[in-house]
Image: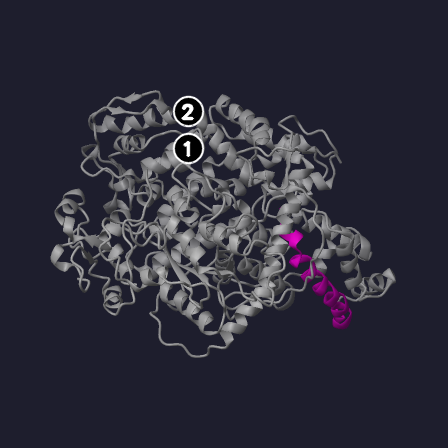
Amino acid sequence: MKSSVTQKESIPQRSNVGRFGRFLTTGLAPYSGEWTDQERYHLLRRTMFGLSMDTLEAYHGLNLDQCITTLLTKSPNPTVPVNDYNSVEITDPLVPAGETWIHNSERNNDKITSGRIVSLKSWWIGAMLDHPPTMHEKMIFFWHNHLATQSWEVYWPHLTYRHFDKIRQNAFGNFKTLVKEITLDPHMLLYLNGALNRQEAPDENYGRELQELFCIGKGPDAKFTEEDVQTAARVLTGHSIDWDKGGEYLYRWYWHDSSDKQFSSFYGNTVITGKEGEDGAKELDDLIDMIFNQNEVAAFIIRKIYRMFVYSDIDEATEENVIAPLAAIFREADYEVIPVLQSLLKSEHFFDIANRGALIKTPLDFMIGFWRTGGVKMPSGANLVQRRQIRTSMLWTMSTLGAEAMDPPNVAGYPAYYQFPQFDRDWITTNSITTRALITDSFVYWGYWSEDLLTTIDLIEHCATLPNPEDPEKLVDGLLGLHLAFPASEAVRQRMISTLLTGQQNNYYWTSAWFDHRDNPADAMKKATVELRLKVMFQFLLQLSEYHLL
Amino acid sequence: MKRRNFIKHATRTAILPAMIQGTGMAAFAKSPLMRALHEDLEETDRVLVLIYLGGGNDGLNSVIPVDQYDRLSKARPDVILPENSLLNLDGVSEVKLHPAMSGLRNLYGEGKLGIIQNVGYPNQSYSHFRSTDIWMTGADTDELLPTGWLGRYLNAEYPNYPVEYPNPEVPDPLAIEIGYNLSVAFQGPVTGMGMVVGDPEWFYRLVNDVDETTPNTQAGEKLKYIRLITKQSQVYGEVIKNAASKVTTQSTYPDNELGEQLRIVARLIAGGLKTRLYMVSLNGFDTHDAQVLGSDHRLGEHANLCRH
């Protein structure tokens, strides 16, 4: 395999990849190296949650171009969330069990509002667990992290649903369109106080984050000023909601500041001409055009994409060979996302051996990826509420790992994508690393707990999906290739084989145990013989540090 | 631990950053904290617990410079607190406290609270995130620092950490943060210098003895990091659990986010942990329009937070 890692003596000033003195020289030229499961899995792991069986089947035998085409296909919409929160404590008088609540804007009962929020979060986790084999679901996570909001802060769940639906419908679409839609989105208008932004009391919050967090960033070339923040806030006055009509978007022209708005030299001293009455709303188009005319917008988003899908740290070579040309593609395509993803995912840089396994799994990659890759299923017979409870348990578990779906820590999203110098290392703490082990151990040994059901992984069934599970060496190689993004050492491999053989030397012991069980599936003793060894081996595999790399 | 050095580092970049900012030095001189800072503390069993007020506390509505009340009410009419609602500090005329901060007022009366005012930096950043980073790293407004001020201090004191730690002389974590993430404040030049603790009674023994070499690559560096944290979780996890288990009864703490965290800290200190630095956090100070009730500025989210 080709490696383009080169030793460099001088460490680029703005880089912290230089921590270990290396950087890459590959760029956007199409990848033309080997095309084996290893490369295919790298592509699929980074763009989806885990490697489910149906994913592997869907991509089996496809070349790189075909893979990309399939990956960048929009998934069908998941069925809408329903009342799966009725319980002994809560009964929703407005929405019957099993019916959708997304058209109901009531929020007078805290138990029902909270029930719906948890239901919605669990619904999204369900969408991730069952996501079709495309990149769509991970792009939703990407945009959610980028245009971050917090559902508990807004506390109006039907607006949260609609907000995420906007992200879902635009995930592969046009970034400029998405920003405009999100600017007028009631969930965002409430979250960043835009709904209260009026001429007499301008609120800078959204005007600031629109530039600092959503479009321009804080890079060395992001030189918008404090006055630009205030001026943008004035342009945005009047975009509000109607609290009496379920929080629908409402333009309050009488709140709008209709004077002319002068921006700084960073924006070429642009003046946005003030407009009166309902026309005041149109100033938003001028504002967005002005912002998107800045070169920094494309570069800023590309860096974000890079950090989530390729690697955490960006050095000068990457800036030059990857970020800048991708930003040019993004601008050329008038901010359509697909051409950028195509170029990046097909590039020799993306497949550079140095980038493989070099990201740390998010709590979602860890937990949902484990579920999908391991072929975990809901316990048979689980009803609507129980299925929601299991997904809710996963929600709280991922929250203790640092990522509660729909509630990142703040409007900047997860620190893994902006907090220099830690970036994705932030996911791993002395607390989270042991919690991660406890989670996989639960699935393997005693069952992952929800309110009244235990969920386990069927290790035998999982192994049976791999070629030659009766051969301990082939089984271990298959599992390592599937579960690890980083090649395991020979010592690790030997320890796993040795576990299957309970320390003995002859591979045949495992082979005969495997066949004995296969031929006598009803024999509990024969099953236990196989399962016990698999449990010990899986605990080891899933606790490996390598397991946390993506 | 060389306390004096610590203070030198600390005062350069400001102690108790988010808690207090404002004008004047009124409540400053008589405080026991300041006396402590000036004493020779080469050898000490003292512990510093930092409380991070996430979102940035409104200092001017916490410690109110009443000697400039008129100017303040002109500048901040939408949030200004009624002057007659403010709490007096014994023997202090220049500043008063938010009406919800009666607990801190009493501590002051007992000589257990010091307040340092006028802590800040030139050209203040209005970005929430940039300003958080500045407080955590001790950087200038236009300076990007990869390490935290506490991390740098600990690295200066324990330059080889984490290699050969823990050891008989330094058996305990250098710093402990209660929560889910390690703040940038504890980030040292090589690694995070602190340990994250959720539940001190909870310790999970892992099966893997990983002591393998890692390649000098991007992925290898991440792997090395994960192994390091894993190792720390094992060696220090047990130490912390042992300290916690020595303390079976504690006095009652307020039933809230902050009380629960401070209870853990007190328990670990009482359990004999020699860790000198702790950080806990209380979030929600990014109050925006909910800071005060329009009808009564003494009430609102900020008041609820100040009551902690």
Prevailing secondary structure of the magenta residues? helix
Q: In this view, does A450 lie above or below A193?
A: below
CA distance for labels 2 and 1: 9 Å
Closest to the observer, A492 or A371: A492
Which chain is home to disc 1? A
Q: In this view, does A544 lie above or below A13?
A: below
- Residue A429 part of the magenta segment: no
Dot 1, how many residues are within 10 Å of its Cα: few (below 14), some (14-19), or many (20+)? many
- Residue A546 part of the magenta segment: yes
- Please state the horizontal and vertical placement of residue A405, each as a whole percent of the image: 46, 51
- Please state the horizontal and vertical placement of residue A366, each as a whole percent of the image: 58, 52
Residue on which the image places disc 2: A294
Query: Is residue B114 in view?
Result: yes
Picture disc at residue A215: 1
Q: Determine which quarter of the picture holds residue A210.
A: top left
Q: Is the residue under label 1 in contact with that under label 2 (CB below 8 Å)?
A: yes
Amino acid beneath label 2: Gln
- Please state the horizontal and vertical placement of residue B46, each as a whole percent of the image: 42, 66
Q: Is residue A12 above or below residue B22?
A: above
Amino acid beneath label 1: Cys
Q: Which stretch is magenta?
A: A522-550
Total marks in image: 2
Closest to the observer, A195 or B168: B168
Q: Residue at x 35, y 71 (%)?
A: B253
Closest to the observer, B235 or A131: B235
Closest to the observer, B102 or B94: B94
